[in-house]
Amino acid sequence: MKKNKYSQILDSLMDDQIPQDLNLAPKIHNRIQHQKGAVMSKRKRVLIPTTMALVLVTIITFTVPAVAETIQRWIGYIPGFGLVHEDTLRTLVEPLDQTIHGVTLRVEEVTASSDKTLVKYSLTGVEDSMRTPREVCPGKNSNPVLRLSDGSQLQDIGLGTFPGIGIVQFEATYSPIPLADETITFSLECLWQTESGSSLASFKIPLQLTDAPLAQLTIAPVVVIPTQAAPVAADESGEQISTVGNMVVNQVIPLADGYILEGTLTVEPKSGMTVDVFNGFLEDVTIQDVNNNELLPSMVPSDFMIEADNMDDHQIHWAMQINPTTIAWPLTITVNSIPVITEPYPASTFQVDVGENPQPGQEWVIEKDVPLGPKLVHVVSIKRVKGNVMMNGYEITFIHDSSLGFSYNIAGGMANGGGGQGGFADGDPMTIVRSFSGDVPVGVLSVELTGQGLDSIQGPWQVTLSEPMK
């Protein structure tokens, strides 16, 4: 079984914190990820609605130990931070802020453990008049920096962005702070896409940390589940459909409004295919209580990190959250199938002439089949779209085989966002929008399609979970 890296996954995009490599296929139309957790429709491939794609962006690179090796070490889970060991955390003594040129940076929280450091901060006062599609922090780092007292810099792990009305909130994750350091400096040198002269020169805020014993924090316990036997059943042909040990629940975290379930699933690999499970969430899953009432699972919060790369012995590490008002235990968890993808197909390119001055709303009918690997993508039309500085580009409508996941880029432009909708079934039109920073490409557009095949490993796999004892 091949490994599927988190770094290959970018689900929703905005103009802030966007990388220049926007190879979104096939993830952009397979699922939606929100910070709290997304309910995933079984056996459906969906695109992010365009209006949502420019509202939320989360770009996270995970560097955490394998779950299978650390289950026994966690003693609790802090919502908004993650799993913790039996040691003392350090937190910010008090929130601090700094205002430069009318822009205020406020550091709300700092939580530091022996595994990571989380900084929650916000920016206010960034007016639309300051924004431009041309300035992209040339020669500077738009990401915040956390420095130790000796001037060294902590490793960047991830950055989450949550735009709101009049305020943008951020969560920045770093490597652990050494115990000897009680004072750190948080700095931000440049704001992405703000006019030179309007943006701040540099924020630098010294932060003081203090011990925060676990006893003073609200911590959900991590309940380790004893080895359980999966039900063994047979289909109509008499073949066994679930075997002991194929699917297990390793730990359960009781929350105030539900439970986080974590475990492993052993599957036989499919030749030439890669398991495509994002953040440990099993899309094609059914959870029923003892009365056969179905419970709807959702994706776990982003702070509950799932190690996707530890695929030894064909094991998938999975996690999901359920939020029922009541539960009639035990639960029966059934995974019907696991999505897999092929290696990326060679890119294909087609061209369309939109003229030197395409106007917003102007549309060009294409009606052309473009090969992508062994598949065909029918390109219906392309439309010039423009909303504001965060939505300025083209919308292309496609019809494609549901066993193909793909996206596109237009040569000569620097994309700063994207999204789309449709394509729920074979033959349904699907639209994908690509927005650009700076000059929008005009004239003869060279559109590159990239993608790969979609398939699944059929189950089912099943396990019964009794009520965890807190």
Image (tube, rainbow, N blue to C red):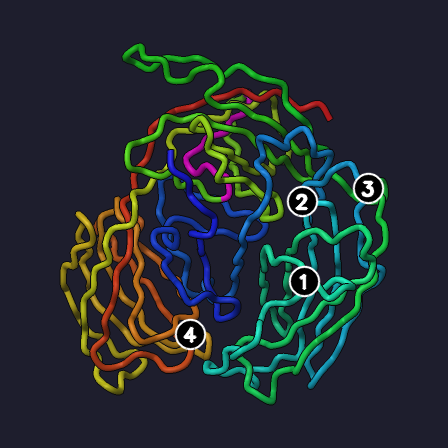
Three-letter amino acid code of the residue under disc 2: Gly
Residue drawn at x 41%, y 35% is 284
Q: Earlier in the sequence, mark 1 or mark 2?
A: 2
Residues 283 and 313: in front is 313
User: Distance between the Cα atoms at labels 3 and 2?
Assistant: 13 Å
- In magenta segment, residue 284: yes
User: Distance between the Cα atoms at labels 4 and 2?
Assistant: 34 Å
Three-letter amino acid code of the residue under disc 3: Leu
Residue drawn at x 26%, y 79% is 362
- Residue at mark 2: 82
Residue drawn at x 46%, y 44% is 278
Residue drawn at x 25%, y 57% is 429
| Labels 4, 2: front one | 2
Q: Earlier in the sequence, mark 3 or mark 2?
A: 2
| Labels 3, 1: front one | 1
Asked if 3 appears above or below 415 in the picture, the reply is above
**Is label 4 in a helix, a strand or a loop?**
loop
Q: Position of residue 76 (x, y in %)?
A: 72, 36
| Labels 1, 2: front one | 1
- Residue at mark 4: 391
**Is label 1 in a helix, a strand or a loop?**
loop
- Residue at mark 1: 153
> In this rendering, would 311 be left or right of 420?
right
- Would you call the spot at circle 1 few (<14 residues within 10 Å), some (14-19), or many (20 or more)? some
Three-letter amino acid code of the residue under disc 1: Gln
Q: Which residues are magenta?
A: 279-290
Q: Earlier in the sequence, mark 4 or mark 2?
A: 2
**Is label 3 in a helix, a strand or a loop?**
helix
